[in-house]
Image (spheres, rainbow, N blue to C red):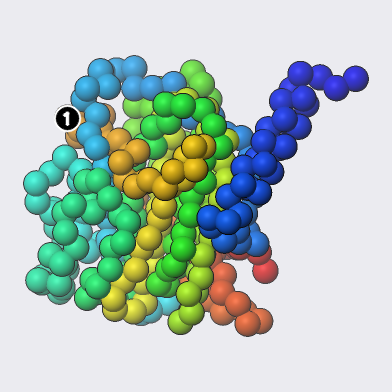
Amino acid sequence: MLGITNLKRIFAGVLAFNVASSLADIIPWSENQFYQEIHGCNGFSDFSADDLLDGFNVKVFENPAGDWDDYSLYYTAYSNAATYYASNSKITDIGASISTMDYYYVTTDIYGMQNIDISQVVFEFTGFLYIEEPGIYLVHIPAVDTGVAVYIGTANSGMSCCGEVGTGDSVWGYTVIVSRVVAGIPAYGTGAQYLAKGYYPIKIVAANTNHNYILDVQFITPEKEYTNIGSWVKNLPSSKCFVNTVVASDTMDIVVAHTTGHDIVSKLVDGTRVSLLGS
């Protein structure tokens, strides 16, 4: 006899299929789409939701060797800051170029971020995706240069989002939702997720080997509305409970490589490089 849990899974799977079918005329579905249900944490128990700030935190890393194996920090920008904060002297290496990334993209939006005269860099956007209405949401990447991966974390329902500061990516249980890597040609990717009500740690990692940077990440609601994913993201004041991921060899290492005619985004997991797109 089918249990309640199995019936829920079957129903959720059918619902996901129906949503996917009805959206077929709106978005191109990629070969790396998949569906699963995850649950976010139950909120920020240490302080009021009024303390939350809109938008992403962002870090930018350079890899002068061009092999994506070594990073050094260019700068860090926080959603609650009026100016960029240089993490080291390398901020002077890019000078006025970095100012072409308007602060608007840090606070509320990363849609359509283009024509940034910086190459050989990795962007990392972090925050908490807040879902008010449960349902199937889609993350869509219509184009990239050179690679983008979107991660959404999961946590047990009893954990406060503010309770595990500074312990790294492993706390959030990041799952790659959608990723796309391209070398000189347009590409896209879409990932579907059933999201219950709650806060979800989110991270968007984007690698760029060329100038005229493109980062276009769309969020599609269960009502099939295209939205600005940045408008769903919250962050924490540093005086309350600041959360921001840090690039390290055993937590987040995104690379671009070529094998048998296609590109791979990979991540170091416990010292072993694991492909996010398959071999």
> In this rendering, is residue 259 above or below 79?
below
Residue at coordinates 17% horizontally, 30% vertically from top-left?
A: 239
Residue at coordinates 38% horizontally, 27% vertically from top-left?
A: 161
Q: Is residue 158 left or right of residue 213?
A: right
**Which of the image's four quarters has the N terminus?**
top right
Q: How many marks?
A: 1
Q: Secondary structure at mark 1?
A: helix
From the top left corner, tell me how far across and down residue 28 is, in percent.
Answer: 57, 61
> Can residue 241 be seen at all in this image of the molecule?
yes
Query: Which residue is labeled 1 in the image?
Result: 239
In terms of depth relative to the viewer, which is nearer, 154 or 138? 138
> Can residue 163 be seen at all in this image of the molecule?
no
Q: Is residue 50 left or right of residue 170?
A: left
> Residue 42 falls in which quadrant of the image?
top left
Residue at coordinates 71% horizontally, 25% vertically from top-left?
A: 8
> In this rendering, is residue 109 above or below 116?
above
In terms of depth relative to the viewer, which is nearer, 117 or 243? 117
Residue at coordinates 10% horizontally, 72% vertically from top-left?
A: 95
**Which of the image's four quarters has the C terminus?**
bottom right
> In this rendering, is residue 52 above or below 243?
above
